[in-house]
Amino acid sequence: MLDFMGNSKNIKRNIVELKNVYVYYKPVFALDNVSISINKGEFVSVIGPNGSGKSTLLNVILGRVIPQKGEVKIFGRKPAVARNKIGYLPQKETFDPYMPFVVKEVVMMGRYSHIGLFKKPHNIDYKLVMDALKSVEMEHKQYEPIGHLSGGERQRIFIARALVGNPEILLLDEPTTGLDVKTQRSLISLIAKIHKGMGITIIMVTHNINFLSQYLDRVIYLKNKVYLDGVPEDILTSDKLSELYGAPVEVFEKDGQVCVMVEDSHSHPHLRIP
């Protein structure tokens, strides 16, 4: 899977399905009667304000959060059974800059669930690590201590770690947070390349839809409930986003790219979904 040889056009097949899902942390609903279906090979972005259940949604798909009500199926099975088919990059990666690991060792950590407890990696595991590093264009850094890398480089390594298990679904929780604009653009371009080259299904939670919309198949606006779900050109409109965010939102095109600007009463307008 970890190559860029190209892939045949995917036949639409539902691989992620949530039906009438409720998750609540008393007394608040994180997910309130959420129903979502995602097809094989789609690139989907989940947007919405803070506290709207976006990270909870990913954890439900992973099987880490069990809904109080509703049905969740991944490849037609319970999430816990399908867990080895999912790669995951959490929102806030626990990172100690002084941990004594080089890059290839960090990526190998993504193979541990496949290798087994207390067992040594085999040749195939080392090959998959190198394939994963090549897919994020970081093979030249394989012997570099992880603490020496920049924020953008570390995110590439953590994405490689999520890919090294040969997943069919990749979940990304705000992977560009804390990165400068140039690095954000570069990382999003890389994620789009991975999607296109591998045919992998990607579900990406983000606050920043700029740079990303041109690559997406769908946008889901989540605010504990699903308020909008459709192709970017239908969802990313000034009227719809202004109504949902309760603030003026301007959507325009620049250099062939859709840009979203939300009026922020505490600062200058900026190109960011809040």
Image (tube, rainbow, N blue to C red):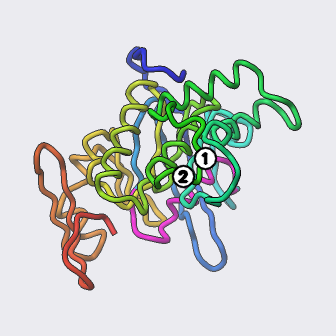
Callouts 2 and 1 close, C-beta under 8 Å: yes
Amino acid on which disc 2 is placed: His
Can the viewer see residue 94? no
- Crowding near the residue tagged with mark 1, few <14, some 14–19, many ≥20 C-alpha atoms within 10 Å: some
Residue 23 screen position, x and y as percent: 62, 63
Residue holding disc 2:
148
Image quadrant assignment for residue 262 = bottom left
Determine the CA span between mark 2 and mark 1.
6 Å
Can the viewer see residue 23? yes
Residue 97 screen position, x and y as percent: 61, 59
Image quadrant assignment for residue 240 = bottom left
Residue 144 screen position, x and y as percent: 57, 42
Label 2: element kind? helix
What residue is drawn where x is 41% and y is 34%? 42
Q: Quadrant of the C terminus?
A: bottom left
Q: On residue 145, which mark appears?
A: 1
38 shown above or below 66: above
> For the magenta stretch, what is the residue range?
47-65
